[in-house]
Image: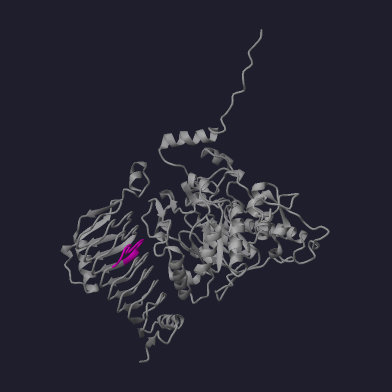
Amino acid sequence: MDKTPNTTPRQSWTFSNDVNSDIRRAAATGIYDIRGGGAKRRVPHFDDLLFLGASMSRYPLEGYREKCDTSVTLGTRFAKKPIELKIPVTIAGMSFGALSGQAKEALGRGATLAGTSTTTGDGGMTPEERGHSEKLIYQYLPSRYGMNPDDLRRADAIEIVVGQGAKPGGGGMLLGQKITERVAGMRDLPEGIDQRSACRHPDWTGPDDLEIKILELREITNWEKPIYIKVGGARPYYDTALAVKAGADVVVLDGMQGGTAATQDVFIEHVGQPTLACIRPAVQALQDLGMHREVQLVVSGGIRNGADVAKALALGADAVAIGTAALIALGDNDPKWEDEYQKLGTTAGAYDDWHEGRDPAGITTQDPELSARLDPIAAGRRLRNYLNVMTLECQTIARACGKSHVHNLEPEDLCALTMEAAAMARVPLAGTDWYPGKPGF
Amino acid sequence: MGNTLDMAQLELRAVNSTLQEAASTKANDAYVIDNPRGSHALACGLNGPVDVTINGSTGYYCAGMNQDASVTVKGSAGPGVAENMMSGTVTIEGDASQYAGATGHGGLLNIKGNASSRCGISMKGIDIVVHGSIGHMSAFMGQKGNLVVLGDAGDALGDSLYEARLFVRGTVKSLGADCVEKEMRPEHLEFLADILAKAGAEAKPEEFKRYGSARTLYNFDIDNADAY
């Protein structure tokens, strides 16, 4: 008997299963989704760029034999004591509170072994972190939790946080589950309450005020410490130019893939620009001011391997910072905890409820039993290994492009696989000598 | 006079480094600053017992992050005076601009005149006495410490307050989200008597009203969304 053929059941692209689950969750709870991490959506990224390598007109360096320097000096503009790093990869700011004490210690250990710096976060400086970090950058945030002049003087550099890529224009939120007695004490807050971090600094507005604030910080620290200004990927040309105007030694530029401990999913996914789109405008601002390499640029947000590092440097950055990748190196989202991720309603690789403090890997938690799972010495070694691999990968590419220092990588070493990446990175689309917006076309 | 620093002759760095060194030696020296001419970041980062008198008005962040030092401004102070102060005493004979005592952790900020908006914003343990009135949004997100105002308070006093205590003798134009009037108990009257005496303020504890956090915003509740 003839059967009328049915059409295949068709899912809506607009109302996908993911979207529908969001709607059902919102309808059930009445509150927006909060999560950790950075943008998960696919955006143009470093994967959309390729290096050209050596050819008739480029002479490569011999791998393992000819030197390819990776050292970076940050803070050469005004600071008496710039930061000297062996590698161009630093550890981004993440707070004790968002992370366990063991995780912060592991970050310090790993960074120190690899010859780079690590950074405090919204919650002050812990003695463990200072003790295990040869070079520690002290964040100066709107909340000023734990801020004090003794720690300011103990720091190797000061990073004034204006914004971050996951949430340019947003403050922070640490839910009550993670406000233990120690975290509360460091932040001068009652235990167990939701801690809100302000989105603006309490005692300055705008770059003119910030210039005076930087003067104060320099006067308090005898003009020794490099002053970084961290901005989210919002208006990178003007943000960078204004940071330079305000007196920054270093600009830290964090794209939308950069992580956060916790904020609204809608904020993470819909505010800010991809890291790839931010670098060239920021470099352009530095060049227009005659400050490229005088004020160093550190780029963060979705850096995963040595190729990403090399591409960021080729586009004009002086160094990169990693956060999410560093946590993964420590053990975050490791499939070995899959059973426990399943119990939390998620799976390894997708776990992002960092704010709830139930991290099976013991990293984004204040629970003593869970955080004891992370051995800071072993985790620090994993981070060291990972940082070393990234550096070796970056050197491999730089040598192939004939560069004796990774800073000699340049946009001319790159091409783009997509129109979008070509436009954002301002490098030619593969196989052409053109990119959208190129002058003269 | 040996311990007079004249800013008509000396740069800011020279003045501050002299004061900072004196503070570090903990010798209880006294210094007079002449001709401050509205300089920013003056007498900031002092970390020991030194007595500093500034003959004139100052710019931003005077006595910022003060520890143990006693700084007196014989004039008015610009924005952020005694910001993030840890301990010691900072006295302003005139008025103070915005953000006075912002994020201060301890010590006494004694403002003999008025203070502008956001006085005591994010305060974390500092005691602030304002002999005159204060502007809007004062003690926003105040966490710890005490703000005592002999005059009036502007709009949105104590918005999003944590555990800071606010005492106002005059009128309050409006209270911010989650800030409420609270009962004045004997320990509060005792505290007021003590701090008013320390600040040389002529007022009686009984004349004040106390304000603090209703603590309804401490843990997020969607039913309070209108308050955010």
The reply to whether residue B217 is visible in this rendering is yes
Residue at 52%, 65% in the rendered image: A243
Q: Position of residue B90 (x, y in %)?
A: 32, 74
Q: Is residue A380 above or below residue B15?
A: above
Q: Position of residue B176 (x, y in %)?
A: 29, 54
Q: Is residue B8 above or below residue A320?
A: below
Residue at 75%, 64% in the rendered image: A403
Q: Indicate the colouring scheme.
A: one colour
- Left or right: A5 with respect to A221? right
Q: Nearer the viewer, residue A155 or B154?
A: B154
- The quarter of the rendered structure image containing the N terminus of chain A is top right
Q: What is the quadrant of residue A321 in the picture?
A: bottom right
Q: Main structural element of the magenta stretch: helix, strand or loop?
A: loop
Task: Specify the farthest residue to the right.
Answer: A56
- Left or right: A203 with respect to A38? left
- Left or right: A172 with respect to B182? right
Task: Specify the farthest residue to the front.
Answer: A440
Magenta stretch: includes residue A372 = no
Task: Specify the farthest residue to the top.
Answer: A1
Q: Nearer the viewer, residue B82 or B34?
A: B34
Q: Is residue A419 above or below residue A144?
A: above
Q: Position of residue A198 (x, y in %)?
A: 41, 56
The reply to whether residue A105 is visible in this rendering is no
| Stretch in magenta | B115-126
